[in-house]
Amino acid sequence: MSFFEVKNIYKSFGNAQILKGINFTLEKGEVVSIIGSSGSGKTTLLRCLNFLEFADMGTINIGGEEIYNAQKNYNDAELRANRLHFGLVFQSFNLFPQYSALKNVQLALDLQTKERLQKQKASKAELKEALAKNMQIATDLLEKVGLGNKIKNYPCELSGGQCQRVAIARALALKPEILCFDEPTSALDPELTGEVLRVIKDLRSAERGMVIVTHEMEFAREVSDKIIFMADGVIEEMGAPEQIFENPTRAKTKSFLKNYVHR
Amino acid sequence: MDFIIILQNLLNGFGNTVLLFAITLIAALPLGLLIAFGSMSKFIPIKAFCRGLVWVIRGTPLLLQVLLVTLVPFYVFNIGNTEIISFLGIKMKTLLFSYACLAFIINYGCYFSEIIRGAIESVPKGQFEAGKVLGMTKGQIFRKVILFQVIKKSLAPASNEIITLVKDTALASIAGVIELYTSAEHLVNQFIVLTPLLYAAIFYLIFNGVLTLLFAYLEKKMSFYKE
């Protein structure tokens, strides 16, 4: 049994069947990259994993626990709790514009701390101490993504690459077990993609698994343990990077990769 | 001597204008937020009610609405104003003023609701989604992420509406409220001079001048970030 198991995920919007039975597994410490042309369902799959959309069929397990089953109904509190297994870095960053980089990273953590301590009826001093600790965590994370000198800046004062690094730090703050990236460099100028990809590469850690939807083939090959090639809502081919990039077996994979090489 | 009397009367009227303005503003903003939520509700009856209300209120003159509110107790519930004031132990002046307030609050609540709804809907979907994936509750997302952006987006259109409100207070005269404009009109009839109207205009201008400066200040305060 794997740490993270996605079984038989189906999703349609109206008459359009977007996902047609997705199955894959991931261990902690592993990185899987999902490649494929636009409209193949990559982003929808990530959104289903983070419960921004709800799969019509299928189950999702983490650590042997079923956290999503399309047959069941979940209330808001359960969804919230289950979402916390995951982190998501968006293509368009979605930073909160009215908060500094530090506050962006710290906000969700603070809200959770406050909620927890209120339940425990903790004193004001304890709360203050816990919030100071959060601030330290957030500062450390921003330093880790190379933005230690930008913690007070607002998103509008940062470049796209810096914004995306803040967004990565923000996702890390909640210590997700599965960290997802939805085309993290697609909204960036070409010269800014490198800094973001370097940061993502450094995130490889035994503490978490990572699922990366990307169009950066070189990066995917370098960073991943496993590549998933999606086409028309199914996993057309899955395997080690060397196998997928050097010896693709399926015709669709071959033609997709050929287009990329010739671009 | 006349000048002093005119000024005193105008100041009394101006006091009513400011009071009506302030009460309307304080009550209509939260009401607007409520109606905005209602208009976006997934529960169809609430949504239909709120959209219908906005349609009726924005589609008819405020003057008519003020008049209607003053007539409702008698013509709908068959209760006269004298009965109400003796029951509540208030002055007739206060009752009429309350009617005007009620009509203004509903009217401006509807206008504000559309401004707020537009602002909420123009906040990018990604902001809500980012809050969700960070495990925030709906309430937390609204209070901590969306609200401030909504206030910033609403400021310019709301300031427009608020300046209009200053001048619309003149319509309370139909309910028998002696506000700035009506007191000026009474003075014109009393002294057979037109200057009170000019003075009233100056009062309105100064009031709106102050508001304009205030809004400029707030906008500057909130311009520390761009989208």
Image (cartoon, coloured by chain):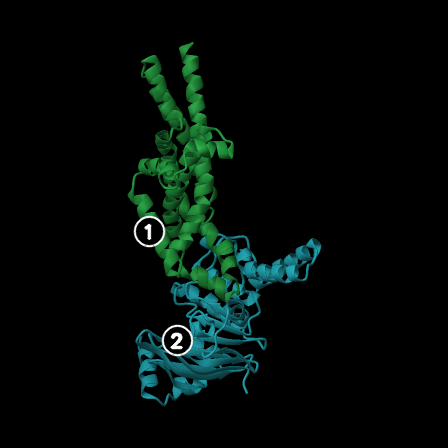
Chain colours: A cyan, B green
At which x and y percent is residue B203?
40, 24
B172 and B8: which is toward the camera:
B172
x, y percentage for residue A14? 32, 73
SS at badge 1 = helix
Q: Is residue A100 visible?
A: yes
Q: Name the kind of residue labelled 1 in the image.
A: Gly
Name the residue carrying label 1: B52
Left or right? Give the position of B181 relative to B136. Answer: left
Tag 1 and tag 2, C-beta contact below 8 Å? no
**Vertical arrangement, residue A102 with respect to residue B175, above or below:** below
Q: Quadrant of residue A41?
A: bottom left
Which residue shows up at 32% across the image and 35% down it? B63
The quarter in which the C terminus of chain A is drawn is bottom left
For the residue carrying disc 1, how many other residues have a C-alpha within 10 Å: few (<14), some (14-19), or many (20+)? few
> Of helix, strand and loop, which one carries label 2?
helix
Q: Nearer the viewer, residue A79 or B145?
A: A79
Res B40 seen here: no
Does residue B91 lie above or below B55 as drawn? above
Q: Nearer the viewer, mark 1 or mark 2?
A: 1
Q: Are marks 1 and 2 on the same chain?
A: no
- Label disc, if present, on residue A42 of the rendered structure: 2
Where residue A136 appears, as percent x and y from the top left, is: 63, 59
The residue sitting at 64% across, 59% down in the picture is A118
Please tell me the numbered disc located at residue A173: none
> Taking B106 as reference, is B20 above or below it?
above
The residue sitting at the top extreme is B1
Q: Amino acid at mark 2?
A: Lys
Query: Would you say A63 lies left or right of B12 here?
Result: right
What is the count of numbered marks?
A: 2
Q: Nearer the viewer, residue A255 or B223?
A: B223
State which chain disc 1 sits on: B
